[in-house]
Image (cartoon, helix red, strand yellow):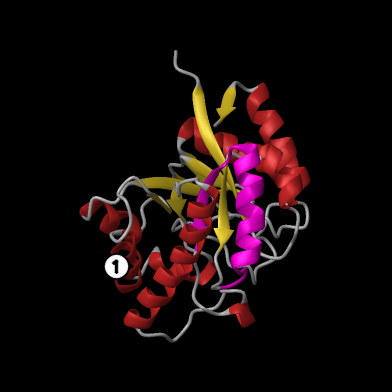
């Protein structure tokens, strides 16, 4: 029987400065590239760390909105959004070229990610940006989302992402951060949440329903105050249950 293998990712380069603590426990990272956080200097620092730890590197572009950390919908034209996303990813690509490492994936951040899951226009802009890069670069997408469908139609490789530290609504969307039940902060609850998704391809919603959810990679947000401890414990529990992190 083939062993189960999954990826654990974290959003980094966002000014939390916990990358050196996170890197030993993750297998891919999403580097902020100037939209909601970060600049060329922070990108260089984090890329070098990821290279040392042999972690897959992804771009984490956002609405260009540092004031709101990219977590609010933004009134921006599709043309301006395309230009901004391209500029953000190109900045990281410049650093990767300097360090002689490749870009593994792209994962939109915050409100951009959530809107692309349900808005075909936003999703199309992201997919059009992806077309300007090598087709070996994957796009992290939520299962059953609009952006998943559009990416597949345009032959963009996808990897399904689920959130280890977030609760889900009955429709498969993430519980709003405005809700007190949005975040999972207990390590045992997190393990059970992730293990159910891996082994049954289902997630238990905040209302107790079980809905379909596939995942190739699981995110623990780097800005979660307990992120390092949660990821460390999650990795150990998964490996104790014969699930490999790659």
* Chain part drawn in magenta: 36-60
Residue 209 appears in the figure: no
Residue at the farthest left position = 153
- Camera-side residue: 65 or 209? 65
Q: Residue at x 43, y 76 (%)?
A: 84
Name the residue tied to disc 1: 124
Q: Residue at x 54, y 55 (%)?
A: 168
- Camera-side residue: 181 or 45? 45
Q: Position of residue 186 (x, y in %)?
A: 75, 46
Residue at the farthest front position = 98
Q: Position of residue 105 (x, y in %)?
A: 44, 50
Q: Tell me: residue 230, above or below residue 46.
A: above
Q: Is residue 93 magenta?
A: no
Left or right, 239 with respect to 70, comes to right
- Camera-side residue: 172 or 44? 44
Residue at the farthest top position = 1
Q: Residue at x 30, y 73 (%)?
A: 121
Residue 133: image quadrant is: bottom left
Residue 100 appears in the figure: yes
Disc 1 element = helix
Q: Is residue 48 magenta?
A: yes
């Amino acid at each position: 029987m083939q062993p189960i293998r999954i990826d654990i990712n974290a959003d980094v380069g966002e000014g939390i400065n916990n990358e050196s603590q996170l890197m030993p426990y993750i297998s891919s990272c999403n580097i902020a590239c100037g939209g909601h956080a970060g600049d060329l200097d922070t990108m260089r620092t984090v890329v070098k760390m990821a290279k040392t730890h042999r972690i897959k590197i992804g771009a984490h572009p956002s609405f260009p909105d540092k004031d709101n950390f990219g977590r609010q919908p933004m009134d921006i034209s599709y043309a301006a959004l395309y230009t901004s996303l391209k500029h953000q990813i190109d900045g990281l690509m410049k650093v990767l070229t300097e360090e002689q490492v490749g870009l593994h994936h792209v994962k939109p951040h915050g409100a951009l990610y959530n809107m692309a899951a349900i808005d075909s226009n936003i999703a199309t802009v992201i997919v059009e940006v992806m077309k300007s890069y090598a087709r070996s670069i994957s796009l992290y997408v939520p299962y059953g989302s609009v952006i998943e469908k559009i990416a597949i139609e345009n032959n963009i490789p996808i990897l399904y992402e689920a959130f280890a530290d977030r609760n889900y609504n009955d429709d498969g969307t993430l519980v709003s951060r405005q809700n007190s039940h949005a975040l999972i902060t207990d390590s045992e609850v997190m393990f059970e949440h992730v293990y159910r998704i891996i082994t049954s391809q289902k997630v238990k919603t905040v209302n107790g329903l079980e809905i379909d959810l596939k995942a190739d990679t699981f995110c623990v947000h780097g800005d979660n105050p307990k992120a390092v401890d949660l990821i460390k414990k999650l990795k150990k529990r998964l490996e104790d249950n014969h699930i490999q992190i790659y």
